[in-house]
Amino acid sequence: MRLRRGCRGWWIALLAALADRITKAAVLAAPRADGPLIPGIMNIRLTANRGMAFSMLSGQTLGLTLLTAVLVAALTGWLIARPDEPKLLRAGLWMIVGGGLGNLYDRLTRGSVVDFLEPAFVRFAVFNVADACITVGAALAILALVLGELRGRKTHGG
């Protein structure tokens, strides 16, 4: 019973990983991938990122692959073991798992992560749907923790 309760939300990770795989497959299959996606807002620029965020630790493929696998497994284990955590926190963490799985798949099959989304209105790193899921998931998890802290202060007279 605890396992079933702990797995609630797994579909969020599945959707995140599938969205990442589908978008990467579409970009890789396109005859000419680079160019505007939404003019003035988002471009497509296909790159192979051999590092992590902002190409940090570039060339450390084995270490980053192992780190990603361990973090995804640890976070999944924590989510399964802690079924009673707030829904917003769990949703954010499942998004991180899904994004991690999407990028882990790339590292295992290609040796690098496929990045292709480039903001046109600001100078920023090229990223992918998995990266976006990880970022949004982290923001949701932080928001859940802050809201939980504020609620705790209110109920304890702080």
Image: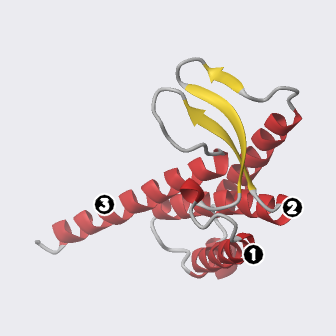
Around disc 3, counting alpha carbons within 10 Å, would you say few (fewer than 14), some (14 to 19), or many (20 or more)? few
Q: Residue at x 45, y 32 (%)?
A: 122
Around disc 1, counting alpha carbons within 10 Å, would you say few (fewer than 14), some (14 to 19), or many (20 or more)? few
- Which numbered mark, 1 or 3, is in the foreground of this view? 1
Q: Mark 3 falls on what kind of element? A: helix
Question: Looking at the picture, which amino acid does disc 3 mark?
Answer: Leu
Q: Residue at x 53, y 24 (%)?
A: 41
Mark 1 vs mark 3, CA separation in Å: 37 Å
Q: Which mark is residue 109?
A: 2
Q: Residue at x 82, y 35 (%)?
A: 26
Mark 2 vs mark 3, CA separation in Å: 39 Å
Q: Is residue 53 left or right of residue 143?
A: right
Q: Mark 1 falls on what kind of element? A: helix
Q: Which mark is residue 62?
A: 1
Q: Earlier in the sequence, mark 2 or mark 3?
A: 2
Q: Splitting the image into 4 quarters, where does residue 9 fall?
A: bottom right
Q: Is residue 146 above or below residue 81?
A: above
Question: Looking at the picture, which amino acid does disc 1 mark?
Answer: Leu
Q: Is residue 79 above or below residue 133?
A: below
- List x then y, in percent, for residue 115: 69, 46
Q: Which mark is residue 147?
A: 3
Q: Earlier in the sequence, mark 1 or mark 3?
A: 1
- Which numbered mark, 1 or 2, is in the foreground of this view? 1
Mark 1 vs mark 2, CA separation in Å: 12 Å
